[in-house]
Every structure is written in C-alpha cells, then in structure tokens.
Image (cartoon, rainbow, N blue to C red):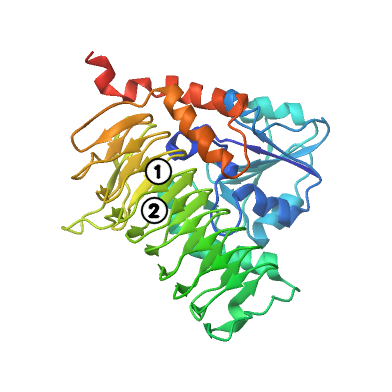
Amino acid sequence: MNLLFFDDPAIRPHLLPLTFTRPVGALRCGILTIAEKWQHRLLATAVGYRTEAYLQAKFPALADGGPVLAINGAVCPDDLLTGQVQALEPGQGLYAGDVLVAAHLPEATLVADLFALELTRTEAAGPVTVISRPWHLFLHNGAEIRRDFALLTHGRTSQPVGDAHTIVYGAENIFIEEGVKIRAAILNAEDGPIYLAKNSQIHEGAIIKGPLALGEGSHVNAGAKLRGDNTIGPYCKVGGEVGNSILLGFSNKGHDGYLGNSVIGEWCNLGADTNTSNLKNNYAPVKVWSHAVGRFVDTGQTFCGLLMGDHSKCGINTMFNTGTVVGVGANIFGAGFPRQFIPSFSWGGAAGFETFKLPKVAEVAERVMARRGLPFDAVEQGIMQHIFEETMADRVWEKAK
C-alpha cells in the first residue's frame, strides 16, 4: 500500500520553526523520522507528502493515483496502532480523540479534501504518541529510540565492537552497523539501547550512555559525554556534553559546551563553548515563543533548552537562555545572553539584531551544503525565499526603519 503523510493544519504551525523547512512527517524522533517509522512497519511501496505548497517540490506527493493510506505525519506508530491502520477499509478513518491518525482513501487525490470527507470513524485502541509541539520531540525521544531499536534490529546480528580498549556495559543492548569505528570509548547500554548507524565513528575517550541513536556518517568527538536519550542524526559531529537532545542531521556541535533538552535543525553549527540553559533558577515551568500564536507559551516543562531551525549558526561562547527559540537562517554572535526568541534571518546577538540578507544566507548555505556534496539548488533557494518573506513581521527592527 502507498503511504501519503499529511500535515495536520491544527498541528503544523505549532511545530515551527522546525516545520518551516520540512513536512511534519520528516521530523526525527528516536532513530528514524516519523515517516520512516511507518514505512518500515507497513512495508510501503511508495511514500509521498501532502504539505505546504512551497515545500512540495522537495517533498513530493505520490506520482500515481489509486488507493492510499493517508497518515498524520505527527503520529508515531507502535505495534497496536500499526495493526489498526492496516485493518482500515476504504472510507474508514482512525481517530485518537480529535486527532485524525490515518484514513484509507480509495483515491490519493481525495487527500486534498481530507478533513471535509465523511469517514467512517474508528477509535484508536490505546494511547497514541502525537508530536504536536517541538519539545515533544525530546520528551518522547528515549521511548522512540527503544521502539526503533527493536524494529531495526529484530532478527539481525550486530557487528562487533572491534576495539580492545573500549569498555562495554549491556552489550546485548548495543547494535553496530557496518563500517562503524570505535576507539577507547565507554558504551553503557544498561539503561537503554545504543544504535550506531553505518560508517559512524566514536572517538577516543567518549562516554556514551543509552538510549542513543547515532546516525549514518556521524562522529562523536574525543572526550564527549552523551548522557542519554540523545539522537545525533546523519552526518553530524558532536562534542562536549549532550543530554536528551536531537540533532536532526547535517549539523555540528563539535566542541565543549552543554546542550540539553534541545532540538537542533539541519545545517546548523554551534560554536565552541556554546551553552544552553535548560532549567530556570526558580525551577518554574519554561515558556517558549510560539510562531502559531505570536507570543510566549507555557510548555509545562521544567526542562527545556534550545529549539533551533535549519541553517542557523552561533559563534563561540554563545549563551542561550532557558527555552530559547531560533528561527531559520539566523547568525548569532557576541557577548551576553541574546533574546529568547531570535527570528529567522537575524544577524547579531545581545547587543541587537539586523537582517541577515537572503543573498548572504544563500552564500553560506551553498558553501556548507557543498561540503557534504549537496547542492543549494533552485528548490532550496525557493524554500528559503518563502520563509524569508513569511517571517518578515517577526523581524521587528525592519518596521522601525
């Protein structure tokens, strides 16, 4: 069966800035993206996305028509939910309260009117994990690493550690794909699994505590301390101390400094000794900026660090306050704590911001992506152009001119 992942209009705006540059289903939580989780479980023959028009060229819909399972890109599957989705008949919809989880459509084009269709209603039989806010990603990350680990490793044999100077605890909870290189590290999987994807590397003196997902081609640098519930997406480099955080992919935090209870987008770079506060001094619940409502909202969480959109970067010794939200294409530098909401295409820091002009952003993005052999092509440029225009009102200094 073909799968078509739709962005729920009641959810997507609340996942900005991460969903400025991707559909909801392309968010990573655990080892896999949400779409990849469903694809593995349902053995889909083809996968497409129903998302914002400006993202559709990069994340296309299905090329062919015919019957399709339309799945909410914000919903993480488990065995029970997967079984219920597989059992849907044409015209049936599976709901978790007010959330449409999935629908069996006789024709893929019907997804355009999905929320207007009169579907035969079926209720989810158990609790459903819905990623409806950015901080839900790190809150559910440990559980999702465990689920994905079981899914990806079932019936398979791990590669050996292959290094006499690496210390291993809970070896049965460690899975190593081909091409992995480990040198004089400590791997502790007693409290959760450790998954090391193809051609990833763990360098000398690194201390790794599970749950951990290390993506393909990623590096854990020498002396790093990964404290658990971490996902380091594909082609990232990570050093220093990291706890309960996600790097979606192609991003670097290569040096010392603390990152906790945070989500970092793609093509980001955190300069040496960058630190994030994830706990307020008064232990009060953390508030973060919501693009959906245009104000700070209460997360209900005691711990919440940095939420950073794609292509944003910060200089050495940057200090992020608790619950800081950074948009897309920002460049942050200078002494002191910058504001807790840094709009997309900002240039500056605690001393103030100006606009990071789109040609300069594109110049940096082209250089950075070329290092990974990927083009900053017309599609990528079009996405950035759209976001630049959509976020203009957030850059309040532009109105003052």
In the figure, 247 relative to 377: above or below?
below
The quarter of the displayed image where residue 380 is located: top right
User: Which residue is situated farthest in the top direction here?
Assistant: 401
Left or right position of 45 against 190: right
Q: Amino acid at mark 2?
A: Ser
Res 262 label: 2
Q: Position of residue 170 (x, y in %)?
A: 55, 83
Give SS at disc 1: strand
Q: How many marks overall?
A: 2
Q: Residue at x 39, y 53 (%)?
A: 262
Contact, mark 2 vs mark 1 (Cβ under 8 Å): yes
Left or right position of 381 against 223: right
Give SS at disc 2: loop
Q: Amino acid at mark 1?
A: Met
Instruction: Pick the residue in front: 103 or 211.
Output: 211
N-terminal of the pair, mark 2 or mark 1, is 2
Q: Residue at x 34, y 41 (%)?
A: 325
